[in-house]
Image: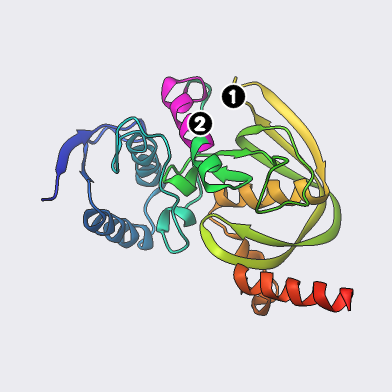
Amino acid sequence: MRAITKGLFRTKATSTPIVFFIGFDRCLEREFLHYFRFIHNIKLTQRIHAALNEIYYHLSYIPIYGDSTMTVQKILKMGNPILRLIASNFDRDEILSEETKLLLENMWDTLEVAGGIGLAAPQIGVSKQLAIIEISEESERYPEAEASEAFIIFNPKISVIDNDLQGFWEGCLSVPGLRGYVERPKKIQIDYLDEFAEQQSIVLEDFLATVFQHELDHLIGMLYVDRMEDAGTLMFEDEMDLLNEVEDEEVLD
């Protein structure tokens, strides 16, 4: 039996109460996304768009699936309209709020279980300017990558320092099972707010610069497949593994 909660939600963006429905099954989720896709395609005004973003931000803390104590979230896949939104900024009070602390816990837990090296808030249905990144020494997805510290990035701004391009085979938790070759600027600067709402700036190059650009693309409604110059390089990871095995055998021969 479908469980539905109905209520009123008053946002900062508009004083008009908005009726929302929260479903506890995938059927109702599809209905909600279909409705969202419809209103998004007729180009909402900025006020209504901001209101919807805020609804997503708050609804993300309601356990729609599974145990209420579980912090691992469902990762949205390519095709979900939330992944195509331009995420809204955090203000200082939001960054320091208990809701955002919970959001960060959810994101780190989700990233660990998924085995990724980065995750943006829109990937778990929260259309806000937030991403986390950490390359661990035990990374199975990118075993040759140099380990990095953990980064929490709010409201980032990217500046290109070196326009020379570098290419990597990128993957994404929202595009599971696939890899594509993408070229991006080699050296960049990121200005952002940390988890204490303090201004930070960092200069990045090589693979870590690509990782940051990949994750921050999620905050402007883009996926790595949008950056690919040649769609013919898109391939399934298992096929790539087979090709690598063949190449290794040829080198040994």
State the residue position of label 1.
195
Provide the major secondary structure of the magenta segment: helix
Q: Quadrant of residue 9?
A: top left
Which kind of residue does numbered mark 1 sit on? Glu
Residue in the picture at 76% in, 46% down = 208
Q: In the rendered view, does 37 fall on the left or right side of 134?
A: left
Q: Secondary structure at mark 1?
A: loop
The reply to whether residue 89 is visible in this rendering is no
Q: Secondary structure at mark 2?
A: helix
Q: Residue furthest front?
A: 253
In this rendering, the count of numbered labels is: 2
Q: Quadrant of residue 171?
A: bottom right
Residue in the picture at 88% in, 75% down = 251
Residue in the picture at 13% in, 50% down = 2
Q: Position of residue 60 (x, y in %)?
A: 36, 38
Is residue 107 inside the magenta stretch?
A: yes
Which marked residue is nearer to the observer: mark 1 or mark 2? 2
Q: Position of residue 138 (x, y in %)?
A: 69, 43
Spatial CA span between label 1 and label 2: 9 Å
Which kind of residue does numbered mark 2 sit on? Leu
Q: Do tag 1 and tag 2 residues touch (Cβ < 8 Å)?
A: yes
Between 203 and 90, the one lying in front of the other is 203
Is residue 191 inside the magenta stretch?
A: no
Residue 62, numbered label? none
In the image, the segment drawn in magenta is 94-108
Q: Is residue 223 above or below residue 130?
A: below
Q: Is residue 148 above or below residue 24?
A: above
State the residue position of label 2.
104
The reply to whether residue 72 is visible in this rendering is yes
Q: In the rendered view, does 153 fall on the left or right side of 110?
A: right
